[in-house]
Image (cartoon, rainbow, N blue to C red):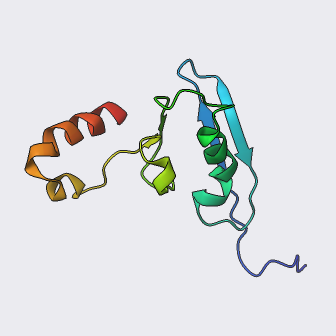
Amino acid sequence: MYNGWLHTVFVTGTICFSVDGCIIWARHNYPGSWNDSDTSLGFRNNLLDPTYCPDARMNVVSDSVFPCSTEMTGRILTPRKDGDLERILPSLRSSARTLHNVIT
C-alpha cells in the first residue's frame, strides 16, 4: 500500500541533559528533516533568550554536527573534527586540544 512517502522516513530528535542527567529540553519527531537545524531551532532560541538562560557563561556541549551561527559563538562547544587541530595556529593548538579532550 502506498503511504505517500517516496523514500524512507527519517525521524530525528534533540535532547538536552543537565549535568546531573535530567532532561531539560527535548524536541522529537521531525519526519523528513535531514539535519539537526530544524530539531534544535527552539532550543537555540531559548539559549539566546536571557529569560531562559540569563548567564552567558552557560554553554552546551554537543557533537560536531550541531548547527552553530554567529550569535551562538561561545554558547555551543563542539569537539574538533579530524584534521582541525593541525589547521589551528600552533600557539592555540594546546588549548584547543585540551578543550577537545574535555568534551570527548
The structure residue drawn at horizontal position 48% and vertical position 33%, both measured from the top left corner, is: 59
The reply, left or right, for residue 35 in relation to residue 8 is: left
Residue 60: x percent and y percent? 50, 36
Residue 93: x percent and y percent? 15, 44
Query: To which quarter of the image does residue 83 belong?
Result: bottom left
The reply, left or right, for residue 26 in relation to residue 102 is: right
The structure residue drawn at horizontal position 60% and vertical position 59%, both measured from the top left corner, is: 37
The structure residue drawn at horizontal position 64% and vertical position 22%, both measured from the top left corner, is: 22
The reply, left or right, for residue 8 in relation to residue 34 is: right
The reply, left or right, for residue 62 in relation to residue 96 is: right
Q: Is residue 41 above or below residue 99?
A: below
Residue 7: x percent and y percent? 71, 78
Which is nearer the eye, 40 or 28? 40
Q: Is residue 10 above or below residue 102?
A: below
Residue at the extreme top of the image, as rendered: 20
The structure residue drawn at horizontal position 43% and vertical position 47%, both measured from the top left corner, is: 73
